[in-house]
Amino acid sequence: MKVGLFFGSFNPIHTGHLVIAEYILEFSDLDEIWFVVSPLNPLKKADELESDEHRLNMAKLAIHENNTRLKVCDVEMNLPRPSYTIDTLKVLKSTYPDYNFVLIIGSDTVETLPKWKGYDELISSYDFMVYPRECNAYKQEFPSERFSLVDAPIIGISATLIRSIIAKDKDVLGYVPDDVWDYIERNRLYGYKGIRILNE
């Protein structure tokens, strides 16, 4: 089994994540892609990060029946904090010794990789599929031959943009799956204050 690991805070998960994952599944030899919902990234600030429970729930709502080859993985929620990718991979390899894991990252993440714990081990032991976040990604140099650029569409959606729209009390339908937007509304996430009649 060859599994792509799509790490992220998914704060919230959005249609861009799903488009990228489905594209990679269609045009690669991966059998599945797992969305690894992470606690706070050691290289990021905690501002506006919703709870682990909410982010996991939204991820599950986003992919529940859309594609049976997409999964949600909560392994990092049960590991010591802060969470480091190299440690997560060791746990996954121990649990699934016959699986071949590939890391899926955005082109903007490549520049931060040298700051990651176990950087040398990561780039020598695992393959990376890089999806473009901007046009100059196609001129980007990679640390090793284990990196490959996926010719996926560049998606002009980000979780930061979505949070800013929600904070203005506007809906983000089209940016996130319908079930995810419904969940955000019902739970008043990301500062949403809109008034809605709930059918309880």
Image: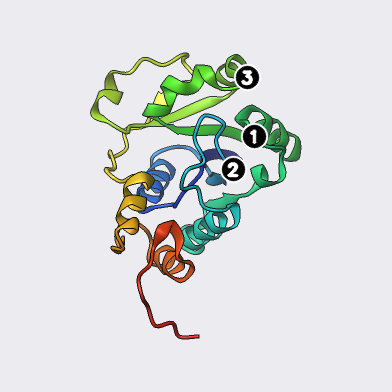
Say which amino acid is labelled 2.
Pro
Q: What colour scheme has been applied to the protein in the rendered image?
A: rainbow
> Which residue lies at the image location 45% right of the left edge and 65% below the top edge?
188
Say which amino acid is labelled 1.
Pro
Residues at circles 1 and 2 in contact by the CB criterion of under 8 Å:
yes
Say which amino acid is labelled 3.
Gly
Q: Quadrant of residue 124?
A: top right
Q: Which mark is residue 118?
A: 3
Quadrant location, the N terminus: top right
> Which residue lies at the image location 72% right of the left edge and 35% below the top edge?
91
Query: Label 1's element?
Result: loop
Q: Which mark is residue 192?
A: none
On the picture, is 149 further left or further right than 96?
left
| Mark 1 Cα shell of 10 Å, populated few (<14), some (14-19), many (≥20) | few
Residue 135 position within the rendered picture, expressed as x and y whole percent measured from the top left: 24, 28
Q: Nearer the viewer, residue 200 or 98?
A: 200
Residue 106 position within the rendered picture, expressed as x and y whole percent measured from the top left: 40, 32
Mark in the foreground, 1 or 3: 1
Query: Label 2's element?
Result: loop
> Which residue lies at the image location 53% right of the left edge and 25% below the top edge?
127
> Which residue lies at the image location 48% right of the left edge and 58% below the top edge?
63
For marks 1 and 2 on the same chain, the one whose residue lies earlier in the sequence = 2
Mark in the foreground, 3 or 2: 2
Cα distance, mark 1 to mark 2? 7 Å
Q: Which residue is mark 1?
A: 82
Q: Which mark is residue 39?
A: 2
Q: Does 193 sit above or below residue 59?
A: below
Q: Nearer the viewer, residue 55 or 49?
A: 49
| Mark 3 Cα shell of 10 Å, populated few (<14), some (14-19), many (≥20) | some
Cα distance, mark 1 to mark 3? 14 Å
Q: Does 103 sit above or below residue 146?
A: below
